Amino acid sequence: MALASERVKVSSVHKGEVTVTGVIPADAFSRSEEHALKELGRDVSAPGFRTGHVPLEVLRAHIPAAQVMEVAVHMALEAAYRGIVKEHALRPLTPPQVTITSKKIVPGEPLSFSIRIGVFPAVKLPDYKHLAAAAVERLRKEATEQGVALLFKERDAALNDIITHTRLELPALAVDLEVERIKRELPADYLEKIKKTEEAFFAEERERIAREFTGQLVMQAIAEAERITPDERVIAAYTDAMKKRHPDIPSGRLIEYARTLFRDEAVFRLLLPISQNATADTGPDKT
């Protein structure tokens, strides 16, 4: 759904975040309500009508209005969001955080909304090849590890030095959302077991999350600068193999994991060509 430009306002990027405000016109929202009814009515049967062919006015009597509105709002906002991202060339880093600002949600009335989006920041890379080489040279003077252990240590040292000298503004929203996810999933007695206060634990988590996000953004920026793109045939084959071993993991997550995995492997081979005397374990069980 492409909204007219006068119905949408996109703020400039501030601290890695943009705010979108807009209005879905009444006629467009009414169409979303009809689409929602049709979707929900696929398996509905009624006297005198075949399943899936029940008229809209009959469906309205069989399906709760609140359920229809929930689906209609989702459909309308999803379509509007896709159009806004495309038209304004946004690069979302976080899922959209949507707030409905309309006082009432009914078909035949406009639907107002506000969306917060953490976007990919501009990344100013240092001389990453020089930093990686210097990190490896420094590490090898004191390292006692060999093989895979040394390889991982070299990669960590190289990436840490590159991150330290990279300039970017990580969206706080990205870190906030990950912290909230951890809070939801944290076992009730976990903090007691590790003998940490909630404040101390999440201060450490925020630092770790920010570092991991920054590392991934740096790796992506290097891949883009060097025009590194994973072979989609390799990605597909790897994903198929993982899906057989992990059928409960959504395919989209497996594909994203595989792309990141092979991208990072290619970047490290570029940065540390002389240290490839061992191969990192990139098996499915690392997901």
Image (cartoon, grey):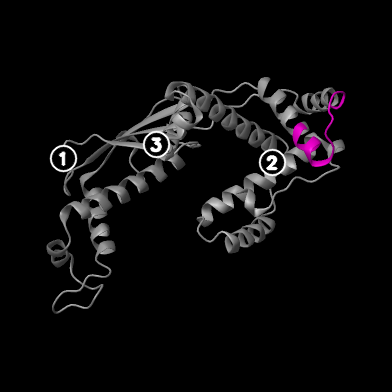
Q: Amino acid at mark 3?
A: Ala
Which residue carries the number 2 mark? 264
Distance from disc 2 to disc 3, alpha carbons, whole Å, reads 35 Å
Q: Are marks 1 and 2 in contact (CB under 8 Å)?
A: no
Q: Nearer the viewer, mark 1 or mark 2?
A: 2
Q: Which mark is residue 104?
A: 1
State whether residue 234 is above or below residue 120: below
Front residue of this view, candidates 218 and 145: 145
At x 27%, y 47%, the residue is: 73
Provide residue 143's location: percent of width, then percent of height. 83, 28
Q: Is residue 141 magenta?
A: yes
Secondary element under disc 1, as helix, strand or loop, is loop
* Residue 282: x %, y % from top left: 70, 49
For residue 262, above or below residue 162: below
Depth check, front residue: 126 or 214: 214
- The amino acid beneath tag 1 is Lys
Q: Is residue 230 left or right of residue 63?
A: right
Write the residue at 79% across / 46% down: 279
Which SS class for mark 3?
loop
- Mark 2 vs mark 3: give the one in front: 3
Magenta segment: 140-153
